[in-house]
Image (tube, grey):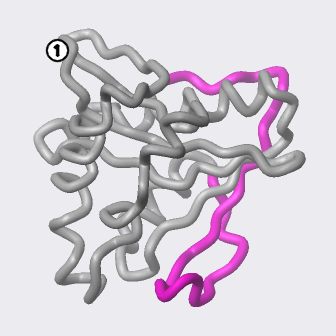
Amino acid sequence: MLEMRVRQGEISDLNALRACIEAAFSPYVPRIGQRPAPLDTDFEPLLRDGRVWLAERDGRVVGTMVLVADGETAEIRSVSVLPTCQRQGVGRTLIAHAETMARQAGHSRVRLYANARLPELVLYYAGLGYTEVERRRDRGFDRVFMVKTLDPLNPPRA
């Protein structure tokens, strides 16, 4: 398996970022009944603000993540992995990177959300230590909100 690295996205990555997100989220449209929010997100400002992180293998973008800070909490806004690279640790590596960055920035928690119509994602995040705190309609989507309290002494392993 090729070595993976995580790096901050740049404006020049916009097309690769969009291609990854399109490939990752488009299959969910029939199950959700609408286009998932990341498909219509304007990623240019997020790239300019340094909030986008990319997982690369052999110089190819295989995963993406948006991470924003909010007080004591960091929020993972979206994670995408190319379908051909799923179940290979890409998502887990991106989330571990987010947790490390949050910890280094002094945040005590990380939150994220998943679409309620994708229960496998809720289970996946639960397996990474995230606890469901709320289910509600948010910006036109049925979402499951989850939180993980960070242990400053035991950083996550990718």
Quadrant hosting residue 131: bottom right
Q: Is residue 133 inside the magenta stretch?
A: yes
Q: Closest to the observer: 78 or 43?
A: 43
Q: Is residue 149 inside the magenta stretch?
A: yes
Range of residues picked out in magenta: 130-158
Question: Could you tell me residue 113's position as x and y percent?
Answer: 56, 65
Quadrant hosting residue 108: top right
View extreme (left): residue: 84
Q: Residue at x 28, y 84 (%)?
A: 34
Question: Could you tell me residue 147's position as x and y percent?
Answer: 70, 57
Q: Closest to the observer: 74 or 88?
A: 74
Question: Could you tell me residue 149's position as x and y percent?
Answer: 79, 46
User: Along the horizontal axis of the image, is 20 left or right of 70?
Assistant: left
User: Along the horizontal axis of the image, is 50 left or right of 85?
Assistant: right
- The number of discs equals 1
Q: Amino acid at mark 1?
A: Met
Crowdedness near tag 1: few (<14), some (14–19) or many (≥20) residues, C-alpha within 10 Å: few
Examine the rendered structure and indicate whether residue 109 appears above or below residue 63: below
Q: Residue at x 27, y 10 (%)?
A: 3
Check disc 1 and report its element: helix, strand or loop.
loop
Q: Closest to the observer: 33 or 114?
A: 33
Q: Closest to the observer: 21 or 12?
A: 12
Disc 1: which residue: 1
Q: Residue at x 39, y 30 (%)?
A: 11
User: Along the horizontal axis of the image, is 77 left or right of 130?
Assistant: left
Question: Could you tell me residue 1's position as x and y percent?
Answer: 16, 14
Q: Residue at x 22, y 35 (%)?
A: 16
Examine the rendered structure and indicate whether residue 124 appears above or below residue 128: below
